[in-house]
Image (spheres, rainbow, N blue to C red):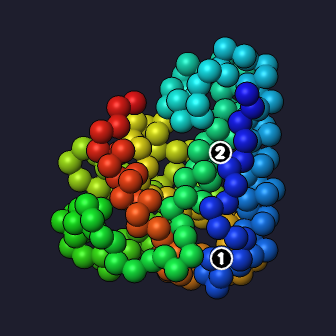
């Protein structure tokens, strides 16, 4: 069965004013859909891949036939990244992290404010299109970035949280002010969903 873009768990305008309705429609309906369409086209040419889910596909890229490997990397990554992105945001989100992820952030970064500062500064410096991520190395949390639609799963790390810094994610509202977007984004983070992903990350085996 072909992969599909998941419906948003909230209305297009629900994350206003942090993320505007026009950006959400374009980002979800056009950009995410394009990744899924391209991924499905690649899978059609190699039906042996159809039994795998998108995370499994990008977890072992060397096993993907060379003819479609880059397509799967880019578009499978785009599908996985955006599926996560919609889930870790919610209306009236934000605030201090709580639960196990809150405790781990405090332990590894000293405070939530220190973590946000480091995450925002690191992600703002990502050259060109890409993502900023929070991953767990088995001992502590780490902030990493990837180019394009690459996902930490390809390096053996399950992403706990990620922010999209492709220009299509913020340009309609923030123009070239990526740091302003990064600072505002924390107002819509769904910490319940992030805690669930942290639980998965702690037991993740590639």
Left or right side of 203 for 58: right
Q: Which residue is mark 1?
A: 14
Secondary structure state at the residue bearing disc 2: helix
Residue 86: image x %, image y %? 60, 60
Which residue sits at x=71%, y=36%? 3
Q: Is residue 125 visible?
A: no
Name the image quarter holding the C terminus. Answer: top left
As drawn, the label of residue 196 is none
Q: Is residue 139 left or right of residue 7?
A: left
Tell me: 185 left or right of 96.
Answer: right
Residue at point 56% right, 76% down? 91
Q: Does any portion of residue 150 appear in the rendered image?
A: yes
Residue 30, image x, y percentages:
81, 56
- Image position, residue 113 (x, y; %): 32, 80
* Residue 189 at x, y percent in the picture: 48, 70
Q: Height in image: 121 above or below 160?
A: below
Q: Which residue is mark 2?
A: 79
Q: Quadrant of residue 204?
A: top left
């Amino acid at each position: 069965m072909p992969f599909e873009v998941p419906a948003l768990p909230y209305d297009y305008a629900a994350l206003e004013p942090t993320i505007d309705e026009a950006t959400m429609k374009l980002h979800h309906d056009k950009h995410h859909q394009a990744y899924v369409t391209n991924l499905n086209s690649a899978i059609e040419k190699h039906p042996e891949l159809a039994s795998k889910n998108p995370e499994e596909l990008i977890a072992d890229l060397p096993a993907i036939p060379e003819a479609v490997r880059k397509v799967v990397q880019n578009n499978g990554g785009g599908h996985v990244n955006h599926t996560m992105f919609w889930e870790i945001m919610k209306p009236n989100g934000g605030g201090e992290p709580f639960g196990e992820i809150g405790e781990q952030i405090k332990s590894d970064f000293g405070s939530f404010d220190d973590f946000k500062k480091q995450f925002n500064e690191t992600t703002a410096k990502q050259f060109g299109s890409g993502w900023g991520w929070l991953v767990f190395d088995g001992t502590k949390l780490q902030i990493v970035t990837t180019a394009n639609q690459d996902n930490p799963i390809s390096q053996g790390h399950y992403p706990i949280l990620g922010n999209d810094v492709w220009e299509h994610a913020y340009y309609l509202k923030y123009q070239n002010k990526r740091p302003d977007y990064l600072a505002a984004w924390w107002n819509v983070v769904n910490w319940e969903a992030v805690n669930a992903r942290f639980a998965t990350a702690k037991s993740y085996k590639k």
